[in-house]
Amino acid sequence: MPSPAPDPNTLLPHATDAAPGIASVEEMAKPWSSKEFFIRNGLTGENTPGMLIRLPTGSASQASGYWAFSVRAPYGDCRLEYVTDLAKLKTDYGFRAPKHPMVGNPCTRTLFDPLKMTTLPGNFFVRGAIVLGSDLRPPMGIEIRVRGKDILAIRTE
């Protein structure tokens, strides 16, 4: 009897307080590159699935050159997707003239622009402004730091 296939989630980085590393600057050097990871929620102890995106603006050696967020939609049970196929943004989401990759909620067809910021109630400035759709807010952010050649996931929003 063959052994069961390994759980692919075990192959992804798992950021903890003691070991927050999720990627290297070198592997994320190309604009729009991405990497999935998990980060441990300090309050609940739960491992939250996240996504790291290298933005085309900012330096790869600075946290401002990245956007990290929870791939769980803030409301509901949907898993957000990073859409690099511009044709899919048109066909699946109805976005007329995409110029770069975006994050989408396939359940509500909402699109979030990684390059745009928005203000939430309480005067909080967050990345991932809604450019199409009806979700209530952008994805929950994950704080990133760059230390030397390592990219660290520090905490969730």
Image (tube, grey):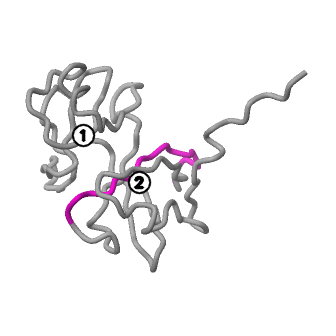
Which residue is pictured at 74% across the width and 30% down the height? 5
The picture places residue 27, in percent across and down from the top left corner, at 45, 62
- In the picture of the structure, the residue carrying the numbered disc 2 is 156
Label 1 is placed on what type of residue?
A: Met
The picture places residue 106, in percent across and down from the top left corner, at 32, 23
Left/right placement of residue 144 relative to residue 31 reads: right
**Which of the two residues, 143 or 55, is positioned nearer the viewer here?**
55
**Which of the two residues, 50 or 102, is positioned nearer the viewer here?**
102
Kind of element beneath mark 2: strand
Asked where in the image residue 75 lies, by quadrant, the reply is top left
The stretch of residues the image draws in magenta is: 43-57
- Counting residues from the start of the chain, the first of labels 2 and 1 encountered is 1
Asked where in the image residue 142 lies, by quadrant, the reply is bottom left
> Does residue 98 appear in the picture of this structure?
yes
**On-image quarter of the N terminus:** top right
Which residue is pictured at 53% across the width and 56% down the height? 42
Which residue is pictured at 84% across the width and 29% down the height? 3
| Residue 54 colored in magenta in the image | yes
> Which mark is nearer the camera, 2 or 1?
1
Asked where in the image residue 143 lies, by quadrant, the reply is bottom left
Kind of element beneath mark 1: strand
The picture places residue 101, in percent across and down from the top left corner, at 24, 41
Left/right placement of residue 75 relative to residue 9 reads: left
| Residue 92 colored in magenta in the image | no
The picture places residue 47, in percent across and down from the top left corner, at 56, 46
Disc tally is: 2
